[in-house]
């Protein structure tokens, strides 16, 4: 099979790791990098041996005619870039969050569907090694029928140091991080029927919320998601590990620091360490999340080559984004919000 030729838009902090992760995927080739700041595109292209650079995405698509476009720009650029790809009939992969409003998310999904253009979301969290192991245990019935779960992503890590633009987001932690964990909850337990959320802003110099607690009713499972980048002294320094505890009628599963997965049943506790693959290019502080990008890419490539649908195509991810915006509505009103099980 010939390589799938792809182009990237966005040359910020995350793009260098995105390109490195793509190099682990067999049968793909980056042909161009685009950024409004051409010098940033040139710098990224030179470090990853990409032959061409652009400052205009439309020009890049028209000249290069890639097999797919990878959008790694900030969220404000997602809508015009995805619509551009749909107009040019180019399959598109987009970083999370899909867009800044639910209406924009729905518009993008509808536009790509109308154009018969594959639209996939780079949602890598569910591909983290210890979290994937939990999925296997739950699918195998290891703890029977789940009835309660808790997810914790609470870290003192200074996420603003490498991504200062996050300080300016009107909606921060649930849009940036909540979409990961809400997607993970859906991956395990299916669709939510209601959402209740409380938020707080601890850093005085940022615009959005940096702490949130959300409770979902997911069928017979009550799911709590705790998020914080508040930087308080006792916050765990295990970024970017997601800690969790799932209770079922026949046992429990715990994900503890250092990639520990513990299964407890009446027969006792069985513990295993499920570390991520190691890649020399990964940032030491982001290695767990960046390793999961490789598995995510493999799933996206299978879909682009005509295999099974990607786990995180845009139609599926739209359900996650509905939860994100429903949580913001709940935090604003102080009331639980019903979620419609739309297709």
Image (spheres, helix red, strand yellow):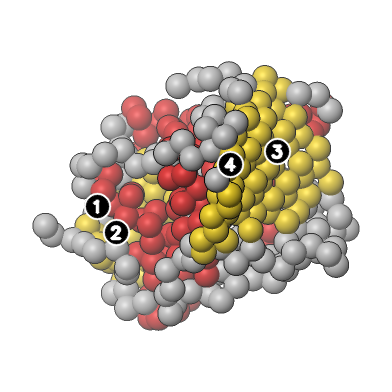
**Disc on res. 266:** 4
Q: From the viewer's perspective, is residue 88 above or below residue 203? A: above
Q: Of callouts 3 and 4, which one flags the residue occurring earlier in the amino acid sequence?
A: 3
- Regarding residue 15, the answer to whether it shows in the image is no
* Category of crowding for the residue at label 1, using alpha-carbon neighbours closer than 10 angstroms: few (below 14), some (14–19), many (at least 20): some
Nearer the observer, 61 or 139 = 139
In the structure shown, which secondary structural element does the residue marked by tag 3 occupy? strand
In the structure shown, which secondary structural element does the residue marked by tag 2 occupy? strand
* Category of crowding for the residue at label 3, using alpha-carbon neighbours closer than 10 angstroms: few (below 14), some (14–19), many (at least 20): many
* Category of crowding for the residue at label 4, using alpha-carbon neighbours closer than 10 angstroms: few (below 14), some (14–19), many (at least 20): few
Q: Marks 2/4: CA distance?
A: 51 Å
Residue to which mark 2 is pinned: 6
- Which residue lies at the image location 43% right of the left edge and 32% below the top edge? 315
Q: Marks 1/3: CA distance?
A: 40 Å
Nearer the observer, 333 or 53 = 333
Residue 68: horizontal and vertical position, in percent? 30, 51
Q: Marks 3/4: CA distance?
A: 25 Å
Residue 132: horizontal and vertical position, in percent? 46, 51
Residue 150 relative to residue 37: left or right: right
Give the mark toward the camera: 3 or 2. Answer: 3
């Amino acid at each position: 099979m010939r390589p799938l030729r792809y182009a990237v838009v966005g040359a910020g902090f995350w793009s260098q790791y995105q390109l490195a992760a793509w190099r682990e995927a067999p049968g793909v080739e980056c042909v161009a990098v685009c950024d409004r700041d051409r010098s940033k595109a040139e710098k990224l292209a030179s470090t990853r041996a990409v032959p061409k650079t652009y400052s205009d995405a439309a020009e890049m698509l028209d000249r290069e005619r890639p097999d797919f476009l990878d959008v790694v720009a900030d969220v404000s650029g997602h809508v015009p870039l995805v619509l551009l790809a749909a107009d040019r009939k180019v399959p598109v992969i987009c970083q999370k969050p899909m867009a800044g409003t639910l209406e924009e998310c729905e518009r993008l999904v509808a536009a790509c569907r109308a154009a018969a253009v594959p639209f996939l979301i780079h949602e890598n969290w569910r591909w983290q090694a210890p979290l994937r192991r939990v999925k296997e245990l739950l699918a195998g019935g290891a703890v029977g029928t789940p009835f309660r779960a808790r997810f914790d992503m609470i870290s003192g890590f200074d996420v603003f140091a490498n991504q200062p633009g996050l300080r300016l987001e009107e909606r921060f932690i649930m849009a940036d991080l909540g979409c990961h964990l809400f997607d993970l909850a859906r991956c395990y337990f299916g669709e939510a029927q209601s959402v209740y959320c409380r938020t707080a802003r601890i850093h005085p110099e940022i615009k959005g919320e940096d702490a949130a607690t959300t409770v979902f009713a997911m069928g017979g499972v009550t799911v709590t998601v705790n998020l914080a980048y508040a930087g308080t002294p006792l916050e765990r320094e295990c970024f970017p590990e997601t800690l969790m505890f799932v209770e079922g009628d026949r046992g429990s599963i715990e994900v503890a620091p250092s990639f520990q997965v513990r299964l407890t049943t009446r027969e006792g506790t069985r513990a295993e360490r499920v570390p991520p693959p190691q890649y020399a290019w990964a940032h030491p502080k982001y290695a767990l999340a960046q390793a999961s990008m490789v598995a995510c890419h493999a799933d996206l490539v299978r879909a682009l080559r005509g295999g099974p649908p990607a786990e995180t195509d845009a139609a599926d991810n739209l359900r996650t984004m509905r939860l994100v915006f429903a949580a913001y509505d709940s935090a604003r009103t102080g009331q639980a919000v019903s979620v419609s099980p739309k297709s």
